[in-house]
Image (spheres, helix red, strand yellow):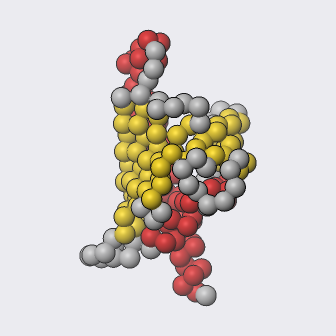
Amino acid sequence: MSRVTVTRVIPAPLDAVWSVFADIADRPAWLSEVDSVEMLTPGEPRPGTRWRETRVDATGARVAEELMVTDIEPDRSMTLTLAGEGEASHLVYEFVPIEVGELRGGTSVTATVESRPHGLANLLITFFLGEIAARSAEGHLREELDELAAAAVARSERHTAA
């Protein structure tokens, strides 16, 4: 199993951060790699919620993936998997309000990608390319959390001004 974890402190309250993150249909508005989202399960996110997300990769190609919420604790965590991948990989996001110190009122967000390669070919690829894949995953997680931070700060500022 491989695991990559990135943590980002966002200077916005938990409710603003969670509301941006949990609004799956709005991901193209704040996540630059996401071109479109097609909701396959209506309503608020819950275990079993599915959507098809089309991303633009580094080469400019459009790649569609179906994602599913496998676990959720509102305002605390959400676990996503690629639909159809079973237990092969998970994206776990954890949200913790910061209640002390100079960052009080902010939110710590930790994103973890866990992958379990299946089959000999995937095990060999992971063995030889694991370091490169881990650095790439870490970079993508950092970018995603930076974009989440920008959107959550903007949402928080709009609420404060209103």
Q: Quadrant of the C terminus?
A: bottom right
Residue 123 vertical placement versus 46 (above, below)? above
Q: Position of residue 13 (x, y in %)?
A: 44, 73
Q: Residue at 36% across / 36% down in the picture?
A: 3
Q: Position of residue 62 (x, y in %)?
A: 71, 36
**What residue occupies the far top of the structure in this picture?**
120
Q: Residue at 43% across / 47% down in the picture?
A: 92
How many numbered discs sit on the rendered protein? Answer: 0
Q: Nearer the viewer, residue 47 or 32?
A: 47
Q: Quadrant of the N terminus?
A: top left
Q: Quadrant of residue 59?
A: top right
Q: Position of residue 42 (x, y in %)?
A: 70, 55
Q: Position of residue 60 (x, y in %)?
A: 69, 36
**What residue occupies the far left of the structure in this picture?**
101
Q: Is residue 126 left or right of residue 155?
A: left
Q: Is residue 131 left or right of residue 35?
A: left
Q: Residue at 40% across / 56% down in the picture?
A: 94
Q: Nearer the viewer, residue 134 or 68?
A: 68
Q: Is residue 120 left or right of residue 156?
A: left
Residue 76 visible in image: yes
Residue 151 vertical placement versus 156 (above, below)? above
Residue 60 visible in image: no
Q: Residue at 52% across / 40% down in the picture?
A: 81
Q: Nearer the viewer, residue 155 or 18?
A: 18
